[in-house]
Image (spheres, rainbow, N blue to C red):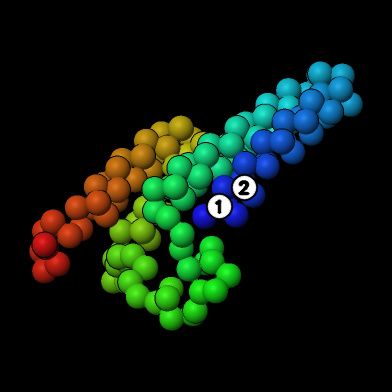
Amino acid sequence: MKIESWLFGTGVFFFVPVAIVYGFLVNWTEWVGILGMLLLGGLAGMIGSYLGVTAKRVGMRPEDREDAEIHEGAGEQGHFSPWSWWPLVLGAACAIAFLGVAVGWWILFIGAGLGLVALVGWVFEYSRGDHAH
């Protein structure tokens, strides 16, 4: 993960100077672009530092070594729910919430409520029913 942390870490040294140059070019009158680029630099720094700390804790992965073989990266990569319907419900709830911002604020509350139900359902999916652990 050292390459990933370096890649995101250099984003700070790119986006912050670009934001300052952009500020001078627009005479510091357009704050949305300046603030957006500064926040993007901060986000890149946070991701880079997280990946750097994780690289020290986990150690070398097969992707980080020059002499690694393909089979070393084989195996379980995580736990995914291929039969879960909750991500679809959560996506529909987000679409309803964004529709509420455009059409009427009362629709936003319906989308937020549906999103809360979908998020709780997705988190506790393996606590009840046939797939409980």
Write down the residue under mark 2: 6
Q: Amino acid at mark 1?
A: Lys
Which quadrant of the view contains residue 23?
Answer: top right
Residue at the (55%, 52%) spot, across then down? 2
Estimate the x, y position of residue 40 in percent, counting from the top left.
Answer: 64, 36
- Which element type, helix, strand or loop, lies under badge 2? helix
Of the pair 15 and 48, the residue shown nearer to us: 48
State whether residue 36 is above or below residue 5.
above
Residue at the (44%, 47%) spot, across then down? 56
Label 1 crowd bin: few (<14), some (14–19), many (20+), radius 10 Å: some
- Which element type, helix, strand or loop, lies under badge 1? helix
Say whether residue 78 is left or right of residue 55.
left
Of the pair 123 and 88, the residue shown nearer to us: 123
How far is mark 2 from mark 1, CA to CA?
A: 6 Å
Residue at the (45%, 42%) spot, across then down? 53
Q: Pick the quarter of the image with the C terminus.
A: bottom left
Evaluate whether residue 129 shows in this view. Answer: yes
Estimate the x, y position of residue 16 in percent, counting from the top left.
Answer: 72, 31
State whether residue 58 is above or below residue 13.
below
Q: Residue furthest top?
A: 28
Which quadrant of the view contains residue 73?
Answer: bottom left
Which quadrant of the view contains residue 36?
Answer: top right
Q: How many marks?
A: 2
Q: Amino acid at mark 2?
A: Trp
Write down the residue under mark 1: 2
Estimate the x, y position of residue 4 in percent, counting from the top left.
Answer: 58, 53
Tell me the tag on residue 96. Answer: none
Estimate the x, y position of residue 93 in percent, counting from the top left.
Answer: 39, 49
Say whether residue 24 is left or right of residue 99.
right
Whether the residues at callouts 2 and 1 have beta carbons within 8 Å, the answer is: yes
Label 2 crowd bin: few (<14), some (14–19), many (20+), radius 10 Å: some
Q: Residue furthest front?
A: 67
